[in-house]
Image (cartoon, helix red, strand yellow):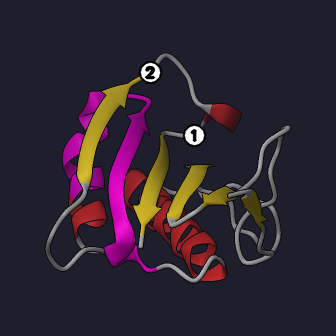
Amino acid sequence: MSKKIIHTSKAPQAIGPYSQAVQFGNMLFLSGQIPINPQNGELVIDNIVVETHQVMKNINAVLEAAGYQIEDVVKTTIFLSSMSHFQQVNEVYASYFSSNFPARETVAVAGLPKGVNVEISMIACK
């Protein structure tokens, strides 16, 4: 088995030495996505709800590029700049799933890339 690098122009380009996602067998490992508009490379930081929707759109674009769907996600990690964002991020996040929610942890961290308030990474499996 070998790994396959997943790349799409419909999600932000990597801002470091990493891939948007890596597929290994039936597993897909998505790097953390932050709220960057892939069309213009600009941060989308109007408010935490808008930021979270942009992150989830970016994630869906990477999933789609690999031939996966949000229903294939088995594990999620959410990084927040503050736990004060938890409820709003949770509501937006939940709106992207219909049932059979993935395992998840949510942590507050001292800082995130480019000063954003939310970053989400996922693991999917078919």
Q: Is residue 98 magenta?
A: no
Locate residue 69: give its quadrant: bottom left
Classed neighbour count for the residue bearing mark 1: other residues with Cα under 10 Å, few (<14), some (14–19), many (≥20): some
| Disc 1, SS | loop
Of the 4 image quadrants, the one containing the C terminus is: bottom left
Q: Nearer the viewer, residue 99 or 126?
A: 126
Q: Position of residue 97 (x, y in %)?
A: 25, 74
Is there any visible trace of residue 25 in the rendered image? yes
Residue type for callout 1: Val
Q: Which residues are magenta?
A: 69-90
Residue type for callout 2: Val
Residue found at x 55% / y 22%: 111
Horizontally, residue 99 falls left or right of residue 85, namely: left
Q: Position of residue 40 (x, y in %)?
A: 82, 70
Q: From this viewpoint, which residue is outermost toward the left?
A: 99
For label 1, the residue is: 116
Alpha carbons under labels 2 and 1: distance apart:
11 Å
In the image, residue 97 above or below residue 21: below
